[in-house]
Image (tube, grey):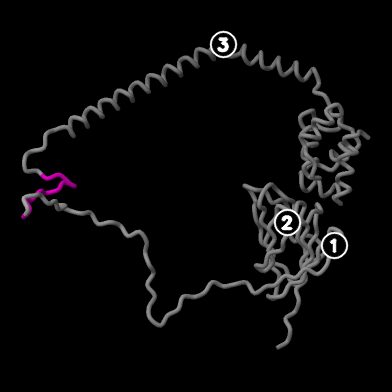
Amino acid sequence: MSELGQVLQRAREEKGITLDDIQRITKIQRRYLEAIERGHFHVLPGHFYARAFIKSYAEAVGLDPNHILTHFQADLPAQPPTEQVERLRRRRVASANNPLQAGRWVTKTLLVLFIALIIGVIYVAAVNNNDDTFTQPIPSGTVTPGAEIVTPGNGGGVSTSPIAQQPQPPSAVTPVTEPGTTTPEPEVSQATVTFESQQGSIYNYSLQGGEKITVHLKVKEDRSWFGVSEGKGKKYVEEGELKKGAKEEITIELKKSAYVRLGKPTVVELTVNGAVIDTSKMKFMPSNITIKLKEAAAQ
């Protein structure tokens, strides 16, 4: 086992993550993950994929992938010289098979310049025509929009009055409420979530309000794997990855209890029946949240 594989395996075990969890998060086959931990890099499909798989593994267990790749550069599989030679040979063959490439580039450039010249000539002609139109003399007695009429005043001075004023659009529209009517108040969630206890990476909460549990997950930044079920040990109702810019949020309805497993809880906003559960201080990766719905007290 290489030192790189030991570091990755130790980080995974400290966070309580299984290889199956890593496979779900990274979409990398389990046999490749096992090969990375054992240092059997020859099993991986090539030099490029080896570095990409190691980087994804490090991100999944909370390590800095750039630091890992730099620090364990000696442990990484080297790029085969034959692969570099073959790549250079293909590049030379491609250049040799396209002797007219430079000529085609020059032709396209000249065509673009010719089109730009035609557009420039048309633009200059249009501007000159507009200048001729707007510089014509205005006949005597003609009133232009926005001009003012000068009339003699009583004191020998002059007073000005605008010919016309354009109506100004209203800056805002104020809603009118009929007498005897009231504006409905926005509906406020009546659900209450109470923290009960914590055992390691498991956080237990109780919920009051509602006849079922509605779990809403939204990633605030980066990405996080998630799994939601009716209880610990039960099959996930839904699982996957929340990722900024792609699948950012999801809503799941359950019955009387919920079990939420978050790969990176600090970047996920968790609400239950509209009430927020603070995940910013959950440092375990992954963290597990249990929620039980309490029956309403009899009136």
Residue 148 versus residue 282 in the image, above or below: above
Question: Is residue 147 found inside the magenta-colored segment of the image?
Answer: yes
- Which region of the structure is painted magenta? 143-154
Is the C-beta separation of discs 1 and 3 under 8 Å?
A: no
Comes first in the chain, label 1 or label 3: 3
**What residue is drawn where x is 37% and y is 23%?**
116
Under tag 1, what secondary structure? loop
Name the quadrant containing residue 128: top left
Dot 1 or dot 2, earlier in sequence = 1
Mark 3: give few (<14), some (14-19) or many (20+) Cα within 10 Å: few
Q: Is residue 15 above or below residue 275?
A: above
Q: Which residue is mark 3?
A: 99
Residue in the image at 79% along x and 28% along y: 47
Instruction: Compare residues 295 and 168 and report the one nearer the observer.
Output: 168
Left or right of 189 on screen, residue 297: right
Which structural element holds mark 2?
loop
